[in-house]
């Protein structure tokens, strides 16, 4: 079937399975990725990791991808079912030459895709190789190698990841806690099962735990409140200290307070900035351009150096590495640690850090975050528009007297409110994020800008 060129995104490959691409594409991707990395490294004897999520289409894509890689002469390290952070860990920790994760992250069940990395889990995306791989697949003359590669099944990776992450925290500081965790029938369960075996003082209430790529309970996208509402209710019913939820491939993590309040990712990021700056005083901290000003406030207040980045996990990681940022966080719930072996999402370390901090503070979670809830956020509001560029130009002209930044879409700042509008890199949408110093201003300016976007 013809390949939809739009599946090549700014930070991964993603689309509707058997509509935008099929199993044959996965084979072509294996050949193309092998040629790309062999050319970059100047050698053919590469070891590349392959992993997959639990989506219904993932097993077939996984097998076709592996076949393409071995036909190109690659030694494939197959770690099987794994979260994306576990995949990154495998590439970085064991010193492999790169790899591909089969996953469509938080997208609905009909989607699937691929995340590509170099050695040390260095991301491949817009400006860092995605264009070349796209060209190889759409226009290249991909050939098989004379010597066929091989497949090595590698087990125990998640256990090694848990052991690694535990070396970076002192779990003896974690008190007796009760936590409700909703993994949305997705990959978070594979990590948390092993992690909490190490924390007998913590009681876990499991929600939607069995892996099921049809997502029977709800979409695995915690950025949408409707997918977190049942967790918020369950936390209150159980009298738990907090709730945790992850997205489809478990590279994003979100928290819920004891009174059922979904914590904005920007608040979580601010807490983590403070914790990691205590650990590494004066460090650079990277964060994306979407509103969440409490992050910048917290970095500066704690003696850190704020580094503003574009939106997107591959883009923020590249900049964090280039500028030597120790910690990085996105408003969408991606949280990265720049370690010696690599820079990638660390949801288990984030979980442990949060549990230690709540144990130390000896406060209800809702009381703990109260001082950080200084601003009023619209949340991310998506709109389908016929011509995103013209809408961005219209907004830029309308708010010409504000302080303008064009790092990613347009960000405009006034003393009492600030906002970012940008085109989605994964969906045909225009995204608005707005923040203000009071609720009334947030609501009025949100509606004012939306009326321009949707007119």
Image (cartoon, rainbow, N blue to C red):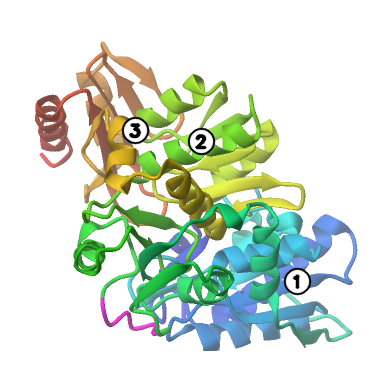
Q: Residue 270 carries which label?
A: none
Q: Name the residue under label 1.
A: 48
Marks 3 and 1 sit apart, C-alpha to C-alpha, by 37 Å
The image shows residue 268, relative to residue 240, as above or below, that is above
- Residue 432 in view here: yes
Q: Residue at x 19, y 68 (%)?
A: 237
**Quick one: label 3 or label 1, which is nearer the N terminus?**
1
Q: Residue at x 14, y 33 (%)?
A: 452
- Residue 246 in view here: no
Q: Which residue is drawn at 72% across and 65% down?
A: 91
* Residues shaded magenta: 212-217
**SS majority, magenta:** loop
Q: Mark 3 points at which residue?
A: 291
Which secondary structure lies at badge 2?
A: helix
**Quick one: label 2 or label 1, which is nearer the N terminus?**
1
Marks 2 and 1 sit apart, C-alpha to C-alpha, by 33 Å
Q: Which residue is drawn at 37% across and 65% down?
A: 179
Q: Is residue 238 left or right of residue 156?
A: left
The image shows residue 387, relative to residue 350, as above or below, that is above
Dot 3, how many residues are within 10 Å of its Cα: few (below 14), some (14-19), or many (20+)? Answer: many
Q: Does the magenta stretch include residue 32?
A: no
Badge nearest the viewer, 3 or 1: 3
Q: Residue 273 carries which label?
A: 2
Badge nearest the viewer, 3 or 2: 2
Q: Where's residue 92, x and y in %?
A: 74, 60
User: Within the image, what quadrant is residue 259 found in?
Assistant: bottom left
Badge nearest the viewer, 2 or 1: 2
Q: Does the magenta stretch include residue 215?
A: yes
């Amino acid at each position: 079937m013809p390949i939809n060129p739009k599946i090549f995104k700014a930070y991964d490959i993603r689309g509707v399975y058997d509509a935008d691409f099929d199993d044959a594409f996965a084979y072509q991707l294996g050949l193309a990725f092998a040629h790309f990395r062999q050319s970059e490294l100047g050698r053919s004897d590469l070891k590349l990791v392959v992993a997959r999520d639990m989506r219904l289409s993932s097993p077939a894509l996984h097998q076709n991808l592996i076949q393409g890689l071995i036909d190109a002469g690659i030694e494939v390290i197959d770690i099987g079912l794994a979260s994306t952070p576990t995949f990154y860990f495998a590439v970085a920790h064991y010193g492999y030459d790169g790899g591909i994760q089969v996953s469509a992250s938080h997208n609905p069940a009909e989607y699937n895709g691929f995340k590509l990395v170099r050695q040390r889990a260095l991301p491949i995306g817009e400006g860092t190789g995605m264009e070349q791989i796209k060209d190889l697949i759409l226009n290249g003359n991909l050939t098989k190698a004379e010597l066929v590669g091989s497949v090595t099944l590698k087990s125990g990776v998640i256990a090694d990841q848990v052991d690694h992450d535990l070396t970076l925290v002192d779990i003896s500081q974690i008190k007796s806690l009760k936590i409700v965790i909703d993994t949305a029938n997705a990959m978070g369960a594979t990590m948390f099962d092993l992690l909490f075996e190490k924390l007998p003082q913590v009681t876990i209430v499991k929600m939607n735990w069995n892996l099921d790529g049809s997502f029977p309970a709800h979409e695995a996208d915690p950025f949408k409140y409707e997918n977190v509402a049942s967790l918020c209710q369950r936390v209150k019913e159980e009298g738990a200290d907090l709730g945790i939820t992850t997205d489809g491939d478990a590279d994003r993590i979100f928290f819920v307070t004891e009174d059922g309040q979904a914590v904005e990712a920007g608040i979580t990021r601010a807490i983590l900035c403070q914790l990691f700056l205590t650990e590494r005083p004066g460090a650079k901290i990277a964060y994306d351009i979407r509103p969440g000003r409490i992050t910048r406030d917290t970095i500066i207040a704690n003696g850190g150096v704020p580094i503003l980045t574009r939106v997107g996990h591959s883009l923020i990681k590249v900049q964090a590495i280039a500028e030597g940022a120790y910690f990085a966080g996105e408003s969408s719930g991606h949280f990265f640690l720049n370690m010696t072996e690599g820079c990638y999402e660390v949801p288990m370390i984030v979980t442990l850090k949060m549990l230690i901090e709540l144990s130390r503070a000896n406060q209800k979670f809702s009381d703990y975050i109260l001082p950080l809830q200084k601003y009023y956020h619209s949340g991310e509001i998506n709109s389908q528009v016929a011509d995103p560029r013209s809408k961005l130009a219209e907004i830029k002209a309308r708010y010409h007297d504000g302080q303008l930044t064009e790092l990613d879409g347009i960000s405009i700042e006034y003393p009492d409110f600030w906002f970012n509008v940008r085109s989605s890199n994964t969906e045909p949408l225009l995204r608005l994020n707005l923040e203000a110093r009071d609720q009334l201003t947030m609501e009025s300016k949100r509606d004012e800008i939306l009326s321009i976007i949707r007119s």
